[in-house]
């Protein structure tokens, strides 16, 4: 009756990762190959309630990047990383659905209660991410699956 619907722990979440600027490292090598988001890319910024992301079940990676154009930003050089709800929950964080006009799959990752989103959690979550390849961004549709 009340509250948002449960999000499955095996659901894939996506987050945009901006291009590096001013010496900030946004992507790093991933153990096992490929790239992952840096802990800096996974930080909650001042004024934000939680870490913004979207659900692959509802929003495609390409659609996520196209939203930048709708906001007057150039999507060139941006990446999309993926991680799983179970990775978020293992850190004692929760995924809260927060749909927007341009992204019906939008959600936020927040600590339970009034706790703060500690930098150590950003670091641990960043290690669980994988930057999608350009081919995955182009071809993966909303509702698709990623196992790795």
Image (tube, helix red, strand yellow):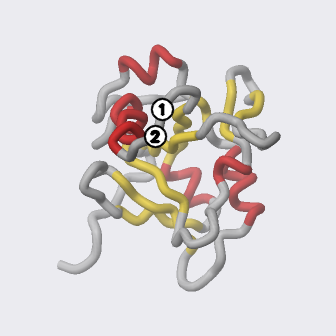
The x, y position of residue 10, in whole percent, is: 44, 45
Q: Measuring 34% from the left and 63% from the top, which residue is drawn there?
A: 98
The secondary structure type at the circle numbered 1 is loop
Tell which of 19 and 132 is nearer to you: 19
Relative to 62, 143 lies left or right = left
Q: Give me the C-alpha separation between circle 2 and circle 1.
A: 6 Å
Q: Quadrant of residue 77?
A: top right
Relative to 76, 61 lies left or right = left
Q: Measuring 60% from the left and 67% from the top, which residue is drawn there?
A: 92
Q: Measuring 66% from the left and 57% from the top, which residue is drawn there?
A: 43
Tell which of 85 and 131 is nearer to you: 131
Find disc 2 in the rendering and name its residue: 73
On screen, residue 57 above or below 141 = below
On screen, residue 126 above or below 137 = below
Q: Measuring 24% from the left and 55% from the top, which residue is drawn there?
A: 101
The x, y position of residue 42, in whole percent, is: 64, 51
Find disc 1 in the rendering and name its residue: 75
Is mark 2 in CB contact (under 8 Å) with mark 1?
Answer: yes
Q: Residue furthest toward the left?
A: 1
Tell which of 119 and 26 is nearer to you: 26
């Amino acid at each position: 009756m009340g509250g948002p619907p449960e999000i499955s722990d095996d659901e894939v979440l996506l987050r945009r990762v901006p291009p590096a600027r001013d010496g900030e490292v946004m992507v790093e090598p991933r153990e096992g190959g490929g790239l992952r988001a840096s802990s800096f890319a996974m930080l909650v910024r001042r004024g934000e309630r939680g870490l913004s992301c979207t659900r692959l079940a509802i929003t495609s990676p390409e659609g996520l990047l196209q939203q930048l154009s709708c906001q007057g930003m150039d999507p060139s050089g941006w990446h999309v990383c993926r991680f799983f709800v179970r990775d978020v929950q293992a850190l004692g964080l929760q995924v809260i659905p927060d749909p927007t006009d341009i992204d019906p799959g939008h959600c936020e990752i927040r600590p339970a209660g009034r706790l703060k989103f500690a930098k150590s959690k950003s670091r641990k979550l960043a290690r669980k991410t994988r930057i999608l390849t350009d081919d995955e961004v182009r071809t993966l549709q909303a509702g698709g699956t990623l196992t790795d």
